Amino acid sequence: MAAAISTITVPRQLLRAERRPRVALVGHARTGKSSLFLAASSAAPHQDKLLHDGEVYDECLVDVGLEQISLVDLPSLGSLHSLNPRDRVLVKYLLWGDRWPPVAAHEAEQPVAAFRAPDVLVQVVDATTLQRDLELSLELSLLGKPLVIALNRVDEARRKGLYINTRALSERLGVAVVATVAHMGLGVAALFAAALAAARDKLVPRHTAPNQHLGATLYPLRSLLARSDVEKAFHVPWRFLLMQLAENDDYFLQELGCHFPTLLPEVLAARSAAEASLPRRLSDELHADRHHRAATIFENVTRFGGAADAGRWQRFLDGLFLHPQWGLIGCMSVFALVLVVVFKLSTTLDAWTAAPLIEWAQQWQPSTTVGVVGRAVADGLIGLVGIAVPYMLPLVLLLVALEESGIMHRVAFVVDRGFHRVGLHGAVAAPFLVGLGCNVPAISMVAATTAGKDRLVATLLMAFVPCSARSAIILAMGGKYLGGLGVLAIFMLTALVLALLGLFLARRYKEAAVGMIQEIPPYALPRWRSVLSATWQRTRDIVTIVTPLLVAGSVLLALLSHFGADRVINVLLLPITSWWLGLPALLGVPILFGVLRKELSLLMVYQALGTMEIMPLLDRVQIATFLVFLTFYVPCVSTFAVMLGTIGWRQAWFSIGLSVAVALLTSGVVRVLLEGSRSMLG
């Protein structure tokens, strides 16, 4: 059966570089605007002030698929009418950016930031207070800019029994409406895809006019403002200027009187005439009309009650994995469960597969060169079975199943906050999780999804992620001789070293990072055909690369031992093995040939020691020291090869030097601490 081919429509002109739109997040306070920015922003956004004594805003570049936006998180905005000094500054930047028109050119305090006017406005709306926020939506529609509504906190609204029809709301406002849960990353990718579409199509919101009586009352005032010189001086849409003057906005009235002194009395007279025909002040009538229109829209797009239990288990899981405070605990529980399952399952699988083969091979003790080579080939294949079947395959299989279910994407979103602390965006979390299976496809994923600083730092850190081969060694040797707590301690040490290295590399490479948006897919039951196919894709190197390397390395080590050449290598590596690590000198060859493939190190240890039971020959301190060194030691040849293509020769060799230094330093510290503890206890 032929595999399905998916097609992606690529726009004729990608919105990148000079074409990238500026997208501004606006809205009331406490609507989740900052959470939405954090869900998409880079690790180090640019921060600046609108005026010398004004509020700050954050800005960063964000990749949205193949395209890019400049995302701005502006201060909260209450209303566009009856502006206080704080909101007035913000509205100026929304209208004009840092290029103020003639009516504002004379002001004492001019723009201090190079701030291009936004191309698209994304209003972040609190779904639990929709009616209030809809009034601001109607006001923002007067600015004549493309607008997208982020209907945030829909999860809280549903818990309160409030259900909002986003399609109906979109039709009423004439803008795209996307439901989001910003702090969980839900709907964020769709939101910014809609913002890009709005920027490309340049579609402005549908104008919802006041009621017919108010429209007729405002017509004389509108006629006075229909002058080209007024439009050129203010450089704002006429509907917005009409409403500002009708609602008695001090700033626009003052500027009108300053630049058009003869027109101001006529405008004031027209406004007074309009008020004379109304039961209340014109500004009050306009506010009441806007409030009524917002309430009408709200009533037509919402309903209370209904299927309150729909999607309950999905919401429960999202609360477990995506909660801002407790989500990390849920994610760590997933990894702990994976390790426990692999640890328990590996014991049974090992007893069924590798153990009988090892027992059979021990009976073969050849003395001829041909016999030694034959035994070495058998040992290599047995070592492959002993590592791949009990440890590597179950680990990769579980990780792929978690990806298929959608859980891994949620884990990546949660650890985003942790990656930001080391100068990276959480989008690299997905490759890091893949790296637990194999570093090679993980680095390829980093190369395909990141650029600049993120690509370089993530690739360098990837060399320290315990792939399934390293994890298999830790689980096989550590689980057998150090116990579950010992294995957990090594993995926790790995996480600590990764965090410290991330901080070091973030300081070393200070180039600004670009934000990325992580899509949160719906939950799904893993399809076993797809899971098995993906598992094979990630582990097929065992057949094509690992098996030849294991067998060749096993044969080489056996021949070195047979002819006595391994002693020379062991003597040359004495400063590392014996003096620094406190290990037997004969482990020099296994350490050296571990660069071929990490699984080879464990096999060579067994061969060098001449037994599968190493506990009598190595104590627990030596085993722990060896495992820590092997965890951080130079990645395998395959990993190094893909690094060359991703970050170049110079940085790839820097990675080698860094891994050797970290491995020596960390394992040396572990040895000193463990020997000190043993001395104190003994």
Image (cartoon, grey):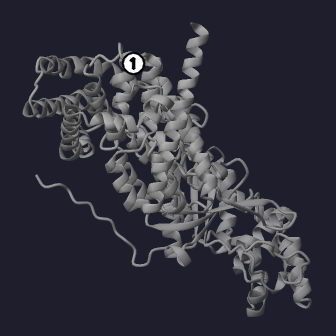
* Image spot of residue 492 (x, y percent): 52, 29
User: Quick check: can you spot residue 357?
Assistant: yes
Depth check: 30 or 47 in front?
47
Which residue was labeled with disc 1? 618
* Image spot of residue 96 (x, y percent): 73, 77
Q: Quadrant of residue 677?
A: top right
Q: Residue at x 20, y 18 (%)?
A: 355
183 horizontally vs 406: left or right: right
Quick one: label 1, few (<14), some, or many (20+) residues within 10 Å?
Answer: some
* Image spot of residue 466 (x, y percent): 41, 37
Q: Is residue 219 above or below residue 276?
A: below
5 horizontally vs 478: left or right: left
Q: Is residue 293 above or below residue 236?
A: above
Depth check: 433 or 644 in front?
644
Q: Residue at x 42, y 48 (%)?
A: 431
Depth check: 412 or 353 in front?
353
553 horizontally vs 378: left or right: right
Q: Residue at x 71, y 57 (%)?
A: 291
User: Quick check: can you spot residue 469?
Assistant: no
What amino acid is at disc 1? Leu
